[in-house]
Amino acid sequence: MANITIGQYYPENSIIHKLDPRVKLAGTMICIIVLFQINTIAGYGLFTIFMAAVIKASKIPFMKLLKGVRGILFILLFSVVLNIFMTKGEILLEIGFLTVTKEGLIKALYISVRLIYLIICTSIMTLTTTPNDLSDGLEKAFGFLKVVKFPVHEIAMIMSLALRFIPTLMEETDKITKAQKARGASFDTGNILQKAKSLIPILIPLFISSLRRAIDLATAMEARCYHGGNRTKMKPLKYAKRDAIGYALSLCMIVVVIGADKVFAYFI
């Protein structure tokens, strides 16, 4: 839980922090689309240069972003191993009934890079955007869905509250873990089943605590007469010149990276 960066805001005076949340949402979606379209070294190389520039502009420490990657390390390793041994192609090594192929290694490398960049992209968005701004951005960006009676405001509020609860749950988990260790509990010994069983003294108090917090929050919102619907904003979102530049750079990135990827794939 300590390695999860999604939902944590990192205060800093950077150009990325000052961008409209709608620009950052669009930029993140564009990055995800690009990641699933590129398949060559040229494409990943140009995307890496773009991401390095964004990280530099955001002033977020690189190690802070890597903490989020450590949170999905198990999924990353599982995906790599699965692709190495399950992809058919030119055999490089045979280990019993398992075979390592050239195509499997390349596919595992590309998928692992994609997963890492997905976490970095989403982490940059949440680390540079407060939950309130992110909620307002989502509501504005998908406001057109109100025409078909889609509950945009309610969905945006749910996502905002979920993001707010992530750091709280992390802190609560840390407290419960330390309390259980002080009582002699061990979470690092035994086989997989024993380790899973040892998590029960953490999960049950965490679940109860989460329910209590949710009930308290619901009571507080009702006491303040919150009922959703049309609401005014103290600080309504407004586009600035830097936001137009942000959109333009995002569109340039998708054209240049995907274009270079297709050209490189054509000539090799």
Image (cartoon, rainbow, N blue to C red):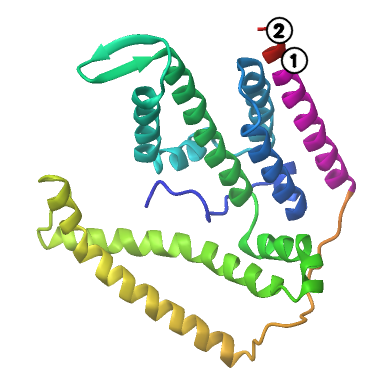
Q: Which residue is drawn at 56% across and 45% down?
A: 123
User: Element type at marker 1?
Assistant: helix
Decide which of 50, 16 is in the foreground and name it: 50
The residue indicated by pointer 1 is: 263
Question: Residue 119 location, x and y as percent?
Answer: 53, 41
The kind of secondary structure the magenta stretch mainly shows is helix
Q: How dense is the environment of label 1, judged by Cα within 10 Å: few (below 14), some, or many (20 and up)?
A: few
The residue indicated by pointer 2 is: 267
Q: Is residue 221 above or below residue 256?
A: below
**Residue 117 falls within the magenta-colored stretch:** no
Q: Which residue is drawn at 67% across and 38% down?
A: 33
Question: Residue 161 location, x and y as percent?
Answer: 55, 69
Decide which of 17, 208 is in the foreground and name it: 208
Kind of residue at badge 2: Phe
Question: Residue 226 location, x and y as percent?
Answer: 64, 86
User: Would you say the residues marked 2 and 1 are in contact, meaning their CB atoms lie under 8 Å apart?
Assistant: yes
User: Element type at marker 2?
Assistant: helix
Q: How dense is the environment of label 2, judged by Cα within 10 Å: few (below 14), some, or many (20 and up)?
A: few
Residue 143 visible in this rendered orientation of the protein? yes
